Image (spheres, rainbow, N blue to C red):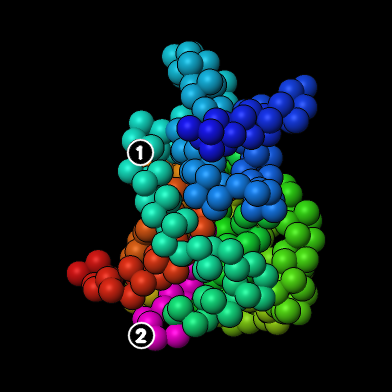
C-alpha cells in the first residue's frame, strides 16, 4: 500500500508542476508522459513506474481533451450550413473501448522492456535485428495521423523507424494539414533525429505532394522526382479529391486536343495521370493508422486502394515493440491486391 500511495503522490506531483495556465489536458498529459521516462532515476521499482506509464497511456487513449470538446462539436454539426469544412477529429481515438488497448500497451511495456528503451541508433539496430528474417517488408509506408493534435517529434521518430526497416518511400498525412503548415519545424526535428541515429541529415527528404506555386524538384518522365534521400510525401486533406479532379481534368483536356485517343484511355493511363498530380507518390503497401478511426478520413483513395491498413492507437505514445509487431503482422498477411 505504501508503494501504491507513493506512486499516486508522484503522479499528482507531476500534474502540479505543470503550469495550469499553459493549457489543456493534452499538454499536461504529454509532459507527464515525457517526464515518466526520468522516473527510473528515482528509488522506485520498475513495476511502479510502468504502472504510472500505463495510467497515462490509458488517459491518452480515453481522449480526455477530445471528449471535453465533443459536446460543442456536436452542437456545431446541427448548424446549417456548416461553419467549417476541414476534417475534424474532436471525438477521435478509441476512448469508448480503452481497456483492451491499455492491456496491449501494458503487455508491450512489460514483455519488451529492452526493445522499448532503445532510442536513436540503438533503435535502428534493434529494428534491423528484429526484422532481418521477415521475407516481406513494406517498401512504401503510409502514416495516417487521424488525431487533432500532431506531435512532430513522434512523427519524426516513426519516420526513422520506417527508414531503419528498409522503407523506400513514405507518405505522411494528417487531418488538419499540420504537417504541411509545420513542415520547416518538422524538417529540423527530423535532421536532429537522423543525426542521433547516425544517419546523414539528407537521408530523408520531404516533398509536398501537391504544392502551390512553383515546384522545387526536377521531374522525370514517369512523374516522379529525382530525390537523393528517402522521400516523405506530405499529404493534406484537400489533396484527396483535389488530385483526382485535376487528373481527370487534364486527361479530358488531352483527349479533347487529340494528345491521346480512345485506345489510350485505360486504367494504366489514368494511374499515370493521378501519380503525376501527386509528384509520383507511390501507393503504400502498408498504411499505419493512428487515432482509432475505422476510416482514412480524406487520404487520397486511389493510392490506398490495395494497401494493408493496420492500427497503432495514438501516435503520441507508440512503442517500438508495437511497430515491430505491425511489421510481423504485415509479413504474415496474404496479399491479394483486391482479388
Label whose residue precedes the other's in the sequence (2 or 1): 1
* Residue 63 spot, x, y in % from top left: 49, 32
Q: Magenta includes 138?
A: yes
Disc 1 is placed on an element classified as: helix
Give the left or right position of residue 125, taking residue 260 as reference: right
In the image, residue 12 above or below residue 198: above
- On-image quarter of the C terminus: bottom left
Q: Nearer the viewer, residue 219 or 199?
A: 199
Q: Where on the picture, by quarter, is residue 229?
A: bottom right
Q: Nearer the viewer, residue 114 or 328?
A: 114
* Residue 255 spot, x, y in % from top left: 46, 66
> Tag 2: Cα neighbours inside 10 Å, few (<14), some, or many (≥20)?
few
* Residue 198 spot, x, y in % from top left: 73, 79
- In the rendered picture of this protein, how many numbered marks are placed on residues? 2
Q: Which residue is mark 1?
A: 99
**Residue range of the region highlighted in magenta in the rendering:** 132-145
Which residue occupies 72% across, 79% down?
199
> Tag 1: Cα neighbours inside 10 Å, few (<14), some, or many (≥20)?
some
Q: Magenta includes 307?
A: no
In the image, residue 281 above or below residue 58: below
Residue 219 appears in the picture as rendered: no
Q: Which mark is residue 135?
A: 2
Which residue occupies 62% across, 56% down?
155
Which residue occupies 48% across, 16% down?
71
Amino acid at each position: 500500500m505504501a508503494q501504491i500511495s507513493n506512486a499516486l503522490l508522484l503522479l499528482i506531483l507531476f500534474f502540479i508542476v505543470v503550469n495550469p495556465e499553459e493549457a489543456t489536458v493534452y499538454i499536461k498529459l504529454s509532459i507527464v508522459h515525457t517526464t515518466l521516462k526520468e522516473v527510473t532515476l528515482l528509488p522506485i521499482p520498475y513495476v511502479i513506474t510502468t504502472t504510472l506509464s500505463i495510467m497515462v497511456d490509458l488517459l491518452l487513449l480515453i481522449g480526455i481533451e477530445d471528449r471535453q470538446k465533443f459536446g460543442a462539436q456536436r452542437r456545431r454539426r446541427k448548424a446549417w450550413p456548416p461553419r467549417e469544412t476541414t476534417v475534424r477529429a474532436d471525438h477521435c481515438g478509441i476512448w469508448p473501448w480503452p481497456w483492451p488497448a491499455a492491456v496491449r500497451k501494458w503487455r508491450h511495456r512489460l514483455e519488451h522492456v529492452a526493445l522499448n528503451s532503445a532510442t536513436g541508433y540503438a533503435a535502428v539496430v534493434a529494428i534491423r535485428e528484429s526484422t532481418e528474417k521477415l521475407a516481406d517488408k513494406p517498401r512504401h509506408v503510409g502514416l495516417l495521423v487521424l488525431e487533432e493534435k500532431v506531435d512532430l517529434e513522434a512523427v519524426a521518430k516513426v519516420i526513422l523507424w520506417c527508414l531503419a526497416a528498409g522503407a523506400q518511400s513514405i507518405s505522411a498525412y494528417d487531418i488538419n494539414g499540420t504537417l504541411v503548415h509545420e513542415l520547416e519545424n518538422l524538417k529540423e526535428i527530423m535532421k536532429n533525429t537522423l543525426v542521433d541515429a547516425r544517419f546523414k541529415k539528407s537521408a530523408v527528404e520531404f516533398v509536398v505532394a501537391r504544392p502551390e506555386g512553383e515546384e522545387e524538384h526536377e521531374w522525370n518522365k514517369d512523374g516522379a522526382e529525382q530525390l537523393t534521400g528517402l522521400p516523405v510525401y506530405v499529404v493534406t486533406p484537400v489533396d484527396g479529391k483535389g488530385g483526382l479532379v485535376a487528373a481527370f481534368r487534364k486527361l479530358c483536356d488531352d483527349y479533347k486536343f487529340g494528345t491521346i485517343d480512345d485506345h489510350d484511355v485505360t486504367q494504366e493511363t489514368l494511374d499515370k495521370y493521378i501519380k503525376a498530380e501527386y509528384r509520383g507518390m507511390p501507393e503504400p503497401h502498408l498504411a499505419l493508422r493512428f487515432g482509432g478511426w475505422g476510416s482514412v478520413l480524406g487520404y487520397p483513395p486511389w493510392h490506398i486502394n490495395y494497401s494493408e491498413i493496420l492500427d497503432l492507437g495514438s501516435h503520441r505514445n507508440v512503442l517500438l515493440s508495437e511497430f515491430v509487431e505491425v511489421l510481423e503482422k504485415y509479413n504474415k498477411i496474404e496479399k491479394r491486391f483486391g482479388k
